[in-house]
Image (cartoon, rainbow, N blue to C red):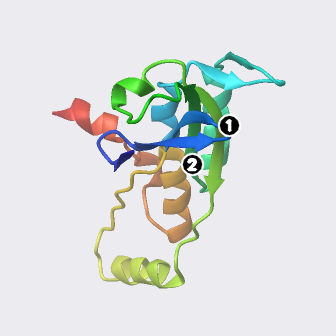
Amino acid sequence: KIPFDSSYKYMATLVDIDHQRFIYLKGAPDVLLGMVDYQFGDNTTEKIEPELWEKMISHQAKKGQRMLATAMKEVSSDQKTITHEDLKEDMVLVGMYGIIDPPKPSAIEAIKKSHRAGISVKMITGDHKDTAVAIAKEIGLKNTDSAITGKDIETMT
């Protein structure tokens, strides 16, 4: 098992199903899209179409959904452990999932009170940028058009 870590934004497990062994991977869609070579097609696997998936991710994220991707590959039944190296080739994208986790009314009220008190509220999240913007609008944050990503911050230094 590779436990989730925010530095690489995924987790992986080695699973036995009907005398076959698979690596299952789940994590941030932008990360997994960079790791997969294939996607499921009609009863087969085919070369990944990242542009198609990126549009879908953005579309769902703009609705405020937190996005999660999953991928897999079959491995030898002799394989007993997994490492990050095992995830570098032949991974097949299984799908993307949008999770709705609405903000608590108390959080929205706390932001309103902060604004009335003259406090500028910022939000830091590991979510997709479009998800963050949608949630920021929903909870009443100001300047929602100025969202930046972790990659943006890395290039600032």
Disc number placed over residue 56 in the picture, else none: 1
* Relative horizontal placement of residue 130, taking residue 153 as reference (left or right): right
**What percent of the width, then of the height, locates residue 146?**
40, 47
The residue where tag 2 is placed is 67
- Secondary structure of residue under mark 2: strand
**What percent of the width, then of the height, locates residue 114?**
34, 79
* Relative horizontal placement of residue 67, taking residue 141 as reference (left or right): right
* Relative horizontal placement of residue 20, taking residue 25 as reference (left or right): right
Does the residue at mark 1 contact the one at mark 2 (Cβ under 8 Å)? Answer: no
Disc number placed over residue 149 in the picture, else none: none
Of the 4 image quadrants, the one containing the C terminus is top left
Query: Can residue 62 be seen from the camera position used here?
Result: no
Mark pair 1, 2: CA separation: 10 Å
Q: Point out the tag, 1 or 2, that comes first from the N-terminus.
A: 1
Q: Amino acid at mark 1?
A: Met
* Relative horizontal placement of residue 126, taking residue 134 as reference (left or right): left
Q: In this orientation, which residue lies closer to the viewer: 18 or 29?
A: 18
Of the 4 image quadrants, the one containing the N terminus is top left
